[in-house]
């Protein structure tokens, strides 16, 4: 993601502080008695990122919720992929926005996943490191209970149909590596067209770009939101509203703004969010570590959800970690 200068965030926060603070629904469905296990990209360090295989394995490992990213193809189909290009995770090349769904469906979404490597998506390892390579294209046999298509790039609708009772967090991405704001807004509009009539009420939509979150809300106002960077900064730094439709904050423990390391997740911020009816869910920035000490610390701060790349390991920790009595 692009780092946002602290000056711009402070200006946003000051302006936002002049707006009335609208509390979230008092019966917020995302408030939890204990932090839930949210599989980030389906648990991208344990399973091939954003595949049906990963999502199924994550749920079986104990994940309560799925986190995924969406892009939009050249023919306006909403697919599940973290990157704006297919280069990093698949055997293809090119921007998602430059390829049709048919072209993307031919790709191997597990091609560069090396489960035993320290960097799970390196491109310079021996062939044997890529355990799942070739399953999507039929060159290798899938694990028992799975099919080749479970290792291809899924559409959002395919994931929603495969997991009708599992809450899903949907993050709007851009269209090119430049990641300009209009790209996010364009994808937000396509996503809203897809979801505006859904009956599901277990979805949260989010984007780093507040303009994309706001545009999505204009077009699909019944779907829950988490704010972008600007909306979160308005609330955290200035005490203003994070934006209409927001039910949860999705933030890191710490974050670098303009070279300054800020503490974002604190007991005080979590308690303030809860008092105003918002849920608090965490992801891990490059300045945080996604590992047991961090998970236990977050439970101690009463967060409602933890987005992890290791859902099986997180589940073990959650089962052993007691929630402080003061959290509820």
Image: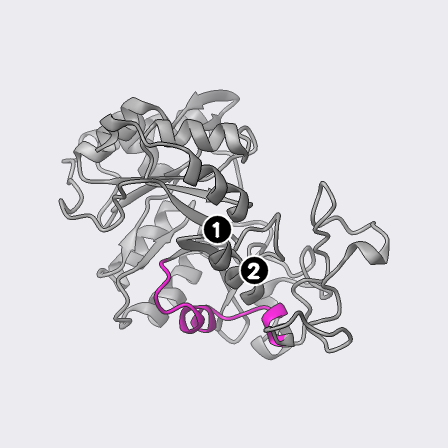
Tell me residue 246's x, y (percent): 25, 47
Q: CA distance from mark 1 to mark 2?
A: 9 Å
Q: Which image quadrant is residue 268 in?
A: top left
- Camera-side residue: 221 or 116? 116
- In the picture of the structure, the residue carrying the numbered disc 2 is 54
In this orientation, does residue 69 appear? no
The answer to whether 173 is drawn above or below residue 292 in the figure is below
Tell me residue 85's x, y (percent): 63, 58
The answer to whether 325 is drawn above or below residue 251 in the figure is above
**Residue at the far right in the pictured view:** 126
Q: Which residues are magenta?
A: 149-167
Q: Which residue is rendered at x = 15% and y = 48% of the image?
A: 27
Q: Which image quadrant is residue 128 in?
A: bottom right
Dots 1, 2 in contact, CB < 8 A: yes
Q: Residues within 10 Å of mark 1 (few under 14, many from 20)?
A: many
- In the picture of the structure, the residue carrying the numbered disc 1 is 39
Q: Which residue is rendered at x = 55% and y = 55% of the image?
A: 82
The answer to whether 90 is drawn above or below residue 273 in the figure is below
Q: Left or right: 199 with respect to 53?
A: left
């Amino acid at each position: 993601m692009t780092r946002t200068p602290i000056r711009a965030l402070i200006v946003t926060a000051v302006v936002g502080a002049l707006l009335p603070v609208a509390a979230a629904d008092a019966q917020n469905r995302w408030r939890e008695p204990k932090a839930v296990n949210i599989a980030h990209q389906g648990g991208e360090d344990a399973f091939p990122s954003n595949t049906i295989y990963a999502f199924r394995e994550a749920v079986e490992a104990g994940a309560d919720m799925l986190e995924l990213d969406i892009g939009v193809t050249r023919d306006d189909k909403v697919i599940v992929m973290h990157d704006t290009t297919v280069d990093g995770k698949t055997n293809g090349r090119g921007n998602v926005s430059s390829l049709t769904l048919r072209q993307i469906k031919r790709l191997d979404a597990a091609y560069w996943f090396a489960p035993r490597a320290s960097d799970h998506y390196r491109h310079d390892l021996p062939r044997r490191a890529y355990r799942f390579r070739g399953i999507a294209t039929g060159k290798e046999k899938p694990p028992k209970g799975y099919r080749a298509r479970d290792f291809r790039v899924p559409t959002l609708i395919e994931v929603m149909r495969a997991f009708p009772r599992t809450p899903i967090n949907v993050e709007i991405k851009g269209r090119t590596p430049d990641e300009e704001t209009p790209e996010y807004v364009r994808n937000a509009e396509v996503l809203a067209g897809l979801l505006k009539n859904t009956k599901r009420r277990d979805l949260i939509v989010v984007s780093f770009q507040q303009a994309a979150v706001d545009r999505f809300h204009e077009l699909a106002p019944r779907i829950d939101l988490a704010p972008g960077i600007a909306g979160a900064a308005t609330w955290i730094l200035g005490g203003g509203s994070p934006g209409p439709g927001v039910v949860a904050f999705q933030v890191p423990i710490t974050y670098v703004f303009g070279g300054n390391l800020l503490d974002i997740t604190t007991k005080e911020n979590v308690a303030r969010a809860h008092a105003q009816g918002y849920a608090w869910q965490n992801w891990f920035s490059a300045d945080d570590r996604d590992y047991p000490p961090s998970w236990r610390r977050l439970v101690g701060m009463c967060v409602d959800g933890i987005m992890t790349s290791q859902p099986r390991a997180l589940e073990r920790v959650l089962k052993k970690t007691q929630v402080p009595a003061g959290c509820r």
